[in-house]
Amino acid sequence: MILVPVKNLAFAKQRLASVLDQAARTELAHAMLHDVLATIAAWNNRPAVSVVTSDSYAMEIGRRFQFEVISDNCNRGETDAIETATAVCVQRGIDSTLVVPGDIPLIRVEELQAIVNAAPASGSVLVPAADGRGTNAAFRCPANLFPLRFGNDSFKPHLAAAQASGKPCVTLSLPGIALDVDSPFDLEQLAAAPGETRAQQLVRCWGRRSVQAASD
């Protein structure tokens, strides 16, 4: 099963507060989540998908794509959301989970398929963020092979936990999945990258407005 954890988007992306007000940060979070879910929806023969959240927008858009919504009533963050959803998967007898965050708007179907193609029969696949510190996708088989603990420096702990499981662990470098948007530099990278995702169009529009305002 594919699990997409989503925190409360009304307070999203606090690390962009120096360049975007909260309304803009929430608008960006909405656009990125739409891009991620739209890409997953376009993946033929994909596993089942669950959006794990208590956020009303995330619930709405998840259902619009006909994905299951697993309620995260505590809303304590991605780590707790995935722990809850993993327990649900184990209870249902689901063999594997692929966790994908909702803030990687350049994700591509080919990258998702690459994860599945590389996945061992029993083991894991980890995709690091562009800075090598975070984890932007994690496949586990069995579904609870090791716990996931998301944060700015999650990749090395995840790799250590995967290796400690005694099962094979594959690390993949996937540029679309690697770009999460947490800093002004990430916004620049997003705008400059090829593509026309919703998030890209939004950030480019903001850039044009800034240039126009400066010239007035």
Image: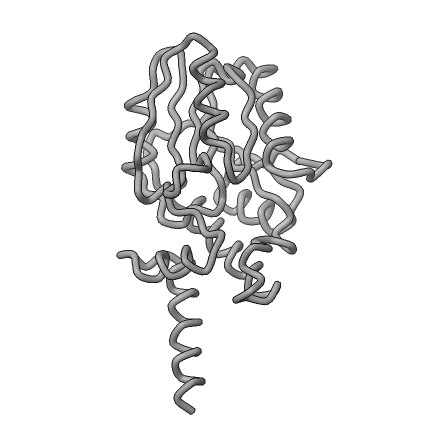
Quadrant position of the C terminus in the picture: bottom left
Nearer-the-camera pick, 133 or 89: 133
Position of residue 200 measured from the top left corner of the image (x, y, whole percent):
38, 60
Identity of the residue drawn at 61% across and 22% down: 88
Residue lying at the far top of the rendered structure: 166
Q: Establish if 101 lies above or below 201.
A: above
Q: Which quarter of the picture shows residue 194?
A: bottom left
Q: Establish if 153 lies above or below 7.
A: above
Identity of the residue drawn at 45% across and 85% down: 213
Position of residue 174 measured from the top left corner of the image (x, y, whole percent):
31, 38
Position of residue 208 measured from the top left corner of the image (x, y, whole percent):
38, 76
Q: Please give left or right for residue 93 compared with residue 122 in the image.
A: right
Residue lying at the far right of the rendered structure: 74
Q: Establish if 86 lies above or below 19.
A: above
Q: Establish if 32 lies above or below 153.
A: below
Position of residue 81 measured from the top left corner of the image (x, y, whole percent):
62, 33
